[in-house]
Image (cartoon, rainbow, N blue to C red):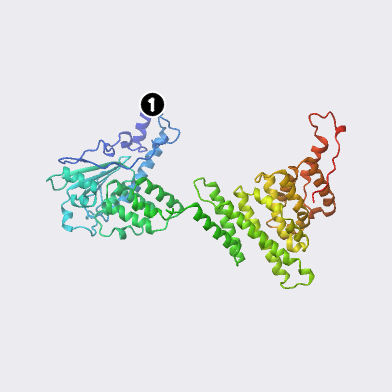
């Protein structure tokens, strides 16, 4: 059976409506018959159409240019088309049910009158006598040929819309009566929005009429109101958008729409919600300093933890947003680092007198203060590393000889949080997030590696839920492996002895030990004939 006969058979059996095979010309804006009128008028230029899509014909991605749709695709498309038409008709009928004009025709004879033939509703806003003398038939046509015709009033359109005032005033002359002139607006994105804008022109209180509408719906009304130069409608939509809250998605739509419409001062007033006219990097940095300082000095520990997490997340988001030109400055972060260092030195100095009988403060509060100061430092350093600005801090931390001496004089239970900072820097160096000279890397380990070894067991027990043991061990091992081979050897031999005595209370850097071993005893340099020429080089352990 040929394709044409197969389609004809399905039409006869009721599977495909006959008008799909022989499409009704009333669905096409260019082929629909116009009402008798003296001088039909063109409609306003429609909003910019959406970009074309490979699936614009509605038959799916497999139906390329020039290809013929399958029978299944034709049937599915027809069913979807009818479902969409039914939904669209129902929505527009609801809108037209409150329209203050009569005889509104909706696509092939559907009217906004009730099913029993009673006229549609009427609301306030115009002289009721005017309703019986409609003199303009306004037709709105969608891209797929869906049509809505409304018998409306020249006086209302001309008073509310500068576009209609110019067109109707120049062309209509002395004609009056039903259907005196016809205006057609074609290729509309959303027929329903055009109908709503026309109904808005009849309303007394636009502010009240927009109450309960969504932001997306009002943006559509704003777009059409702007297209037909309906200034009151534009102003009402802008007032609505200025007064209501926006979701994240709505915010992006509002910003995009207002910038596309070029409404200038009225729109800029609304956009002050998302952009400050006089913001500068200096003023922003002052705000950042206040926020970060507030977190470091917070009295409520729970609130402090929550705000640390929030601010850290926001700063990470800023790093990925290349359009963000404002950021917390390096100077601000390092000023906070020095404050934290001063607090640590003061706390440890007080702690050294605890075992000498100085009981000005109880041990619990002293331990909490040291842990808090160390945690503050850890947080600021984390931000520095995220901002690729941690190099100077590695040098600063390596030079804290006085702090390291104080650290060694107090019990591990008080001080172990401080070694988290050293571990944090080793992780960053091992990942390549912080680039510092080998002298600085060696100085860091010379000053703080012994303290890290001593505190490791307490770090592991006290922070078992938050401490990533493997991450610290990998970072430490990688940092050691960046040093010259002789210095690697001195550190590895010292670790070997310590690990045999401490076991799990010592960082397990066996993987780095294996790499050092192969470098020192297995791998041959290009100029060496065999292993017999290689010798162990002795070096003093960093101190």
Residue at left offset 18%, top offset 58%: 127
Residue at left offset 50%, top offset 52%: 281
Quadrant including the N terminus:
top left
- Out of 320 and 100, give the one closest to the viewer: 320
**Does residue 378 appear to the left or right of 187 in the view shown?**
right
**Does residue 27 appear to the left or right of 312 in the view shown?**
left
* Residue where numbered disc 1 is placed: 2
Residue 16: x and y, percent?
Answer: 36, 37
Crowd band around label 1 with a 10 angstrom C-alpha radius: few (<14), some (14–19), many (20+): few
Query: In this figure, what is the number of numbered marks?
Result: 1
- Out of 374 and 109, give the one closest to the viewer: 374
Residue 452 lies in quadrant = bottom right
Of all residues, the one furthest to the top in this rendering is 2
Residue 64 in view, yes or no = yes
Residue 30: x and y, percent?
Answer: 26, 36
Residue at left offset 42%, top offset 58%: 245
Assign a secondary structure to mark 1: loop
Residue 132: x and y, percent?
Answer: 16, 54
Residue at left offset 33%, top offset 39%: 144
Of all residues, the one furthest to the left in this rendering is 174
């Amino acid at each position: 059976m040929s394709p044409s006969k197969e389609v004809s058979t399905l039409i006869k059996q009721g599977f495909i409506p006959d008008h799909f095979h022989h499409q009704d010309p009333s669905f096409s804006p260019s082929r629909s018959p116009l009402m008798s009128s003296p001088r039909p008028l063109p409609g306003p230029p429609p909003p910019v159409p959406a970009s074309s899509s490979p699936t614009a014909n509605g038959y799916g991605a497999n139906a390329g240019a020039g290809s013929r749709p399958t029978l299944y695709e034709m049937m599915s498309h027809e069913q979807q088309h009818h479902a969409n038409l039914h939904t669209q008709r129902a929505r527009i009928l609801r809108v037209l049910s409150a329209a203050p004009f009569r005889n509104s025709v909706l696509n092939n004879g559907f009217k906004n009158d009730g099913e029993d033939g009673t006229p549609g509703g009427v609301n306030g806003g115009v002289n009721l006598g005017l309703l019986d003398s409609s003199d303009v038939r306004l037709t709105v046509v969608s891209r797929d040929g869906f049509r809505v015709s409304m018998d409306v009033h020249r006086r209302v359109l001309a008073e509310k819309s500068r576009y209609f005032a110019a067109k109707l005033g120049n062309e209509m002359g002395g004609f009056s009566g039903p259907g005196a002139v016809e205006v057609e607006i074609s290729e509309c994105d959303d027929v329903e929005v055009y109908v709503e804008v026309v109904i808005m022109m009849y309303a007394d209180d636009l502010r009240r009429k927009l109450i309960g509408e969504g932001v997306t719906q009002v943006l559509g009304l704003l777009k059409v109101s702007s297209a037909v130069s309906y200034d009151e409608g534009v102003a009402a939509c802008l007032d609505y958008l200025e007064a209501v809250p926006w979701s994240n998605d709505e915010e992006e739509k509002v910003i995009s729409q207002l910038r596309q419409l070029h409404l200038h001062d009225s729109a800029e007033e609304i956009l002050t919600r998302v952009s400050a006219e006089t913001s500068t990097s200096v003023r922003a940095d002052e705000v950042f300093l206040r926020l970060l300082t507030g977190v470091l000095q917070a009295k409520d520990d729970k609130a402090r933890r929550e705000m640390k997490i929030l601010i850290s997340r926001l700063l990470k988001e800023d790093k990925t947003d290349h359009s963000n030109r404002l950021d917390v400055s390096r100077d601000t972060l390092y000023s906070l680092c020095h404050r934290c260092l001063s607090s640590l030195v003061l706390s440890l100095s007080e702690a050294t007198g605890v075992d000498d009988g100085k009981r000005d403060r109880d041990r619990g509060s002293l331990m909490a203060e040291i842990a808090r100061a160390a945690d503050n430092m850890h947080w600021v350093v984390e931000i520095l590393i995220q901002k690729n600005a941690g190099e100077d801090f590695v040098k600063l931390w390596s030079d804290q000889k006085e702090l390291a001496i104080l650290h060694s004089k107090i019990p591990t239970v008080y001080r172990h949080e401080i070694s988290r900072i050293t571990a944090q820097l080793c992780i960053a160096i091992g990942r390549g997030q912080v680039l510092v000279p080998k002298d600085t890397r060696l100085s860091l380990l010379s000053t703080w590696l012994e303290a890290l070894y001593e505190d490791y067991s307490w770090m592991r027990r006290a922070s078992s839920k938050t401490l990533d043991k493997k991450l610290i061990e990998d970072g430490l091992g990688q940092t050691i492996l960046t040093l010259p081979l002789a210095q690697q050897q001195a550190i590895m031999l010292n670790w070997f002895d310590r690990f045999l005595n401490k076991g799990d209370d010592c960082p397990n850097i066996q993987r780095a030990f294996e790499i050092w071993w192969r470098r020192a005893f297995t791998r041959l340099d290009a100029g060496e004939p065999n292993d017999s020429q290689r010798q162990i080089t002795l070096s003093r352990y960093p101190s």
